[in-house]
Amino acid sequence: MHTKALYAGSFDPMTLGHLDIIERAAKIFDELVIGVTVNLEKKTMFSYEERMDMIREVTKDMPNVTVDKCEGLLADFVLDNGFNVVVRGLRNTTDFNEELSMDQLHKHLYRGKAETVYITAKNEYAFISSTMARQVISLGGDGSMLVPDHVLHTMRAKLGLE
Ligand code: ADP
């Protein structure tokens, strides 16, 4: 069976934790699409175009990875685009508990056509969140252990720090 996996999130911005999940998922599944969610109510540091551009640049050498805009209900996006796998990253028991309840909903909404697969974070990335990266980098802290280099430069340029 051809496996077409979706890894969706806001990626505001993409972190080293996200990148690690992407690299590992890309080895397991035939195709991996990074779905950048567009949420007009949630104020993001980067527009969805900027978030997509950063992910494209960082993943440009991964031949089975593409980036797409993910709008509306996740389950509709999954079914309309023929995904049979949805990848989620798990950092800790807070993520786990949230994912368990979402999973009950998705088992229903995916109508047996897609399965959610959880990949646990590596220890060294399990504490990283996009919120933490935005806070540290906007205050001028060293963000090199939080986000890929390209993301760090893009953020610092946007903040007028370089
Ligand atoms: P959302 O807006 O859905 O919270 P995020 O961009 O924060 O999106 O995260 C997308 C996915 O990546 C989620 O499954 C989340 O649990 C996972 N994730 C986030 N940070 C990390 C990390 N440091 N290590 C592993 N997985 C992570």
Image: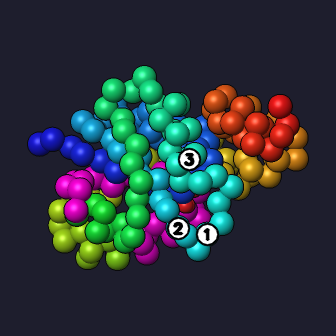
Residue position for label 2: 39
Which residue carries the number 1 mark? 42
Mark 3 crowd level (few <14, some 14–19, many ≥20, 10 Å Cα): many
Is residue 91 in view? no
- The residue under the point 17% across, 62% down is 113
Along the polypeptide, which appears first: circle 1 or circle 3? 1
Q: Evaluate if marks 2 and 1 touch, with contact meaning CB atoms under 8 Å apart.
A: yes
Using the image as rendered, state which of residue 62 and residue 118 is in the foreground: 62
Residue 12: % across, % down? 61, 52
Query: In whole angstroms, how far apart are the C-alphas of marks 1 and 3?
Result: 14 Å
Chain part drawn in magenta: 80-104
Instruction: Say which quarter of the image contains residue 29.
Output: top left
Q: x, y (%) of residue 99?
A: 46, 66
- Give the residue type that dot 2 points to: Asn
85 relative position to 60: left or right: left
Q: Is 152 one of the magenta-colored residues?
A: no
Circle 2 residues within 10 Å: few <14, some 14–19, many ≥20:
few
The residue that appears at 11% across and 42% down in the rendered structure is 1
Q: Residue furthest top?
A: 61
Residue 138 % position (x, y): 82, 47
Disc 2 CB within 8 Å of nearest ligand 1 atom: yes
Label 1: which secondary element:
loop
- Report the residue at 49% width, 62% height from top: 38
Q: Which residue is mark 3?
A: 51
